[in-house]
Image: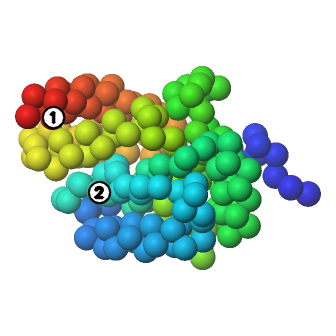
């Protein structure tokens, strides 16, 4: 019997939040997965692929899960063509709302795991004008601003202790900081 969507959501949200010190191998893991995606998926659908999130920021502690932002030409094609290919390879697939519960815009999200079932990658597939691309401002700004990066690292450690068994709350509690710093970053780069 196959897993229902609710069972799948319950399974993936119950996993523990563990923060580790920065690992320079995270970039290698990103590059390997990028190469894999480019080999197994059509270049008619897959365009640019970026490493974002804490594992993309040198020195930043993080959950050891590589966040990848993948530009796709069509979310409909991604659901119909890409999702079945990656699910057949063992990835978890979700048609996921950007914010909150069932609040558009939606996008394709995949979880890749290692042979022991531990998450290794979160793959966010979005079209070129999707708001997720603003996350690159956040990444680049923290790389250039050690003070802000330190504040974020401290927040992550604090929240990971407070919400060790609540992945959703951990993520939600970081949101205000991320949005505030992203706006700072956009202003900074637009005035540069």
Q: Indicate the quadrant containing the C terminus: top left, top right, bottom left or bottom right.
A: top left
Q: Where does residue 184 sit, x and y in percent of width and height?
A: 18, 27
- Pointer 1: residues within 10 angstroms few (<14), some, or many (20+)? few
Of residue 56 and residue 59, the one placed in the foreground of this image is 56
Q: Which of label 2 and label 1 is nearer to you?
A: 1
Residue 125 in sight: no
Of residue 93 and residue 116, the one placed in the foreground of this image is 93
Residue 53 in sight: yes
Kindly identify the residue that appears in the image at 16 percent across and 30 percent down.
190
Kindly identify the residue that appears in the image at 60 percent across and 65 percent down.
41
- Pointer 2: residues within 10 angstroms few (<14), some, or many (20+)? many
Q: Where does residue 157 sit, x and y in percent of width and height?
A: 29, 46
Kindly identify the residue that appears in the image at 71 percent across and 56 percent down.
81
Q: Indicate the quadrant containing the N terminus: top left, top right, bottom left or bottom right.
A: bottom right
Q: Is residue 27 left or right of residue 122?
A: left
Kindly identify the residue that appears in the image at 60 percent across and 71 percent down.
40
Lower sequence index among marks 2 and 1: 2
Q: CA distance from mark 2 to mark 1?
A: 19 Å
Question: 31 above or below 21?
Answer: below
Contact flag, marks 2 and 1 (Cβ < 8 Å): no
Q: Is residue 61 left or right of residue 2?
A: left
Query: For residue 56, which numbered disc appears in the image?
Result: 2
Of residue 173 and residue 182, the one placed in the foreground of this image is 182
Q: Is residue 81 left or right of residue 144?
A: right
SS class, disc 1: helix
Residue ID for mark 1 = 189
């Amino acid at each position: 019997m196959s897993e229902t969507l609710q069972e799948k959501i319950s399974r993936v949200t119950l996993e523990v939040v563990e923060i580790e010190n920065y690992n320079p191998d995270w970039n290698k893991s990103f590059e390997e997965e990028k190469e894999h995606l480019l080999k197994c998926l059509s270049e008619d659908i897959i365009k640019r692929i970026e490493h974002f999130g804490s594992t993309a920021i040198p020195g930043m502690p993080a959950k050891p899960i590589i966040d990848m932002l993948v530009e796709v030409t069509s979310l409909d094609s991604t659901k119909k063509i890409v999702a079945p290919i990656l699910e057949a390879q063992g990835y978890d697939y979700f048609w996921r709302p950007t914010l909150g519960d069932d609040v558009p815009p939606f996008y394709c999200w995949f979880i890749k795991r290692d042979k022991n079932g531990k998450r290794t990658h979160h793959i966010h597939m979005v079209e070129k004008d999707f708001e997720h691309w603003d996350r690159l401002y956040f990444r680049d700004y923290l790389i250039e601003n050690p003070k802000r990066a330190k504040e974020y690292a401290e927040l992550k450690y604090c929240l990971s202790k407070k919400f060790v068994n609540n992945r959703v709350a951990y993520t939600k509690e970081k949101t205000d900081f991320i949005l505030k710093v992203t706006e700072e970053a956009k202003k900074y780069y637009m005035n540069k």
